Image: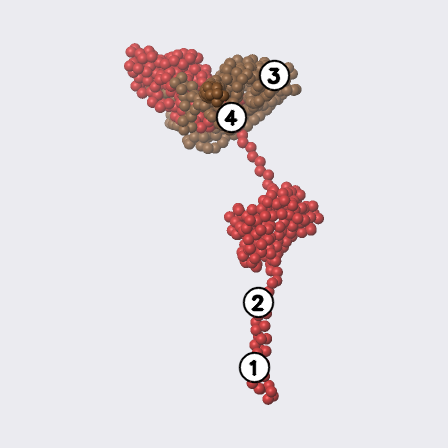
Amino acid sequence: MKNLTSHYSRWKALAAVFVLLLVAQVLILLPRASAATLTNTYVRLDRLSADTATSFRLVFKTAGAGATSVTVDFTAAWASASGSVNATQSVSSASCAADTGATALPGSITAAGAGNVVTISSVTALSATTAYCVDLTSTSAVTNPSAGTYSPIVTAGSDSTNTTIDIVGSNADQIGVTASVGESFTFSLSSNSAALGALSAAGPTKLGSPISATVSTNAAGGWQMWAADPAGTPGLHSTTANHTIGYSPAAGAAASALSTGVEGYNLGSGTIGGTTCGTPTYGNFASGGVNYKGSGLDNTLRSLVSATGAADTCALPLTTNASISNTTPAATDYASTITVVAAGLF
Amino acid sequence: MGAFKTVVMAALLVIGLPAAALAQAAPTEGVSLQISPLPIELTAQPGASTATDLRVRNAGSQDEQLQVRLLKVSADDNGNVHLTQPGANDELVQWVNFSKTVFDAPPGQWQDITMTINLPKTAAFGYYFAVEYLRANTEQAQPGKAVARGAVATFILLNAQAPGASRQAKIVSFSADRKSYEFLPANFTIKIRSTGNVHVAPHGNIFILHGKKQISSIPVNAVEGNILPGSSRFFQASWNDGFPVYIAKNNNGAPVFDKNGNQAKTLKWDFSKANHLRFGHYTAHLVMVYDNGTRDVPMDAFVSFWVIPWRIIGAALLILIFIGIGLWSSFRKTGRFLKRQTGRVKKSSPKRDA
């Protein structure tokens, strides 16, 4: 007891206890090099159909830091069910980050397949507890096995986890969509009447603004437009004056312009215009931009224009022109009616 | 007397109701109608009935009351299609019935009409008509105005299958719009006549040959447009696979026209197609077929033309001439120089010898 309580012995005992405590502290505080589990991990095949080659996306969240390679082991079960891993792989992390919210796998990454395993190399050391993503972009990165559930193992450095993939029957991963577009034909007139105003022997008069006859059709066979005057006595007729300003030139004749002081009435067509109009063939009514030029109508539907191919908002401007002589009876009720018919051709 | 008045008033009211309904005022805006499908091809046995659905949509913004009626369709040898009103005794009018002939058409809504054709036993071969859709209350003449009535029509091609049906066609003409071109396009017109008693739809290709080598192929009537019996139809085709090539001139999407009213053209220099510079004698070989009911019947025709890009040839010749003149001038100068040098050597040689 005397020895133990001696000054020297006390120091030795205290030193031994201190050393033991220090060793225990070091053993407790130093990190241990043991494997952890990756979290939030999935392998998303771009096709889930059995026996189908596909690319895939890998997303995982690290546990520890420092991994410089990542592997996906599709396991022997995959291979035994006719699945395979392509030896040649292409890899990119350029576009996955925007889709997944994970960090693009960093580094000048490369990938290769061997056996059941795809290995991604040249990864810049990964950070701990960070989600990463990468795409194996080859459309034949892997070939799916027969339908069933498989559990590939994803490993980053020393951390790993199992994921689950359900492979479905052949082409059961896609929805077939079919549609048809029937042929249709739309025709419209911009107005159903237009005033010629007061006619004068000093010169011919034309409609202030033409009536547009507009066609839209997806009928590839083309389309045609006709016009007729259904009146018993075609022309510009006044009931009160019992007088008709007849067509000039007559129906069926080539277009010509009305003359000052000479009674006459005609229908002129301009040039078709619109988003799509095809190649037009004009009837006798084409004015060619000449004022008061047109042709006559009668009860027979006469061709205004025909065109090949489809049409998109293709408009034909129609103008009526009238001219009177010094002896044309005065009246305020001169009027005419023109029928315009359009159809998609056969 | 009072009772008599009441009866008369009631009778007038009853008689007047349909008239009032029909007298619904026509809309003030121009008509706007959409129809589908088109055209409609039907086949039926004589003595049988056939039916088809017709659809029309009021594409305007006002309520419409529409009517359907028949038009006869014919075509002539110049490719014109004629629509005419059938006569009261026209047999076709007796065969065709519509599920409704006058109906309301609210804006934007499709209206379905079933058309039934009861073919008599004597019917045979092709019958061609159109179903016309127009306002039930047509616009009346208005003092001081030109009134425009709009209508739209669906063509019906009916084949009454009877013994003796004949689908036949022949190429009447095949021509190019010029005998020689500086630059493409070369435009072809094909006139085909239907010589049978049922419509036909010939289609095919124009094969462009340079010598014996085929260098291009252009489809003709790829959409299989029909030709009615006893009429002709013109088909257009264009060979524009060249460098440079004329294209239609547009200004902000609107076509530009020359002083004659023809669409103006401009040369397009697409240097990625520089190897498509056309030069020489070409032959266009038209090959078309039509189904005569049992097999495809071929028809063919040829037309030849030249493509001589004289401006490009002229420019190339001019460059060659300049190069030639340059070379000739250089050789001449070099020759003179050498001659002078040779002369000096000759003059100086005797002195050295001396």
Query: Which mark, by number, is residue A30?
Result: 2
Q: Amino acid type of disc 2?
A: Leu
Q: Amino acid type of disc 1?
A: Trp
Position of B47 with respect to B250 (left or right) is right
Under tag 1, what secondary structure? helix
Name the residue carrying label 3: B299
In this picture the colour scheme is by chain
Name the residue carrying label 4: B274
Compute the Cα span from label 1 to label 3.
121 Å
Which sits in the foreground, A244 or B319?
Answer: B319
In x, y percent, where is residue A246?
37, 13
Name the residue carrying label 1: A11
Are dots 3 and 4 on a single chain? yes
Q: Earlier in the sequence, mark 1 or mark 2?
A: 1
Compute the Cα span from label 1 to label 2.
28 Å
Compute the Cα span from label 1 to label 4.
101 Å
Q: Residues within 10 Å of mark 2 (few under 14, many from 20)?
A: few
Under tag 2, what secondary structure? loop
Question: Is residue A41 depicted above or below A311 in this figure?
Answer: below
**Number of the front mark, 1 or 2:** 1
Q: Quadrant of residue A325?
A: top left
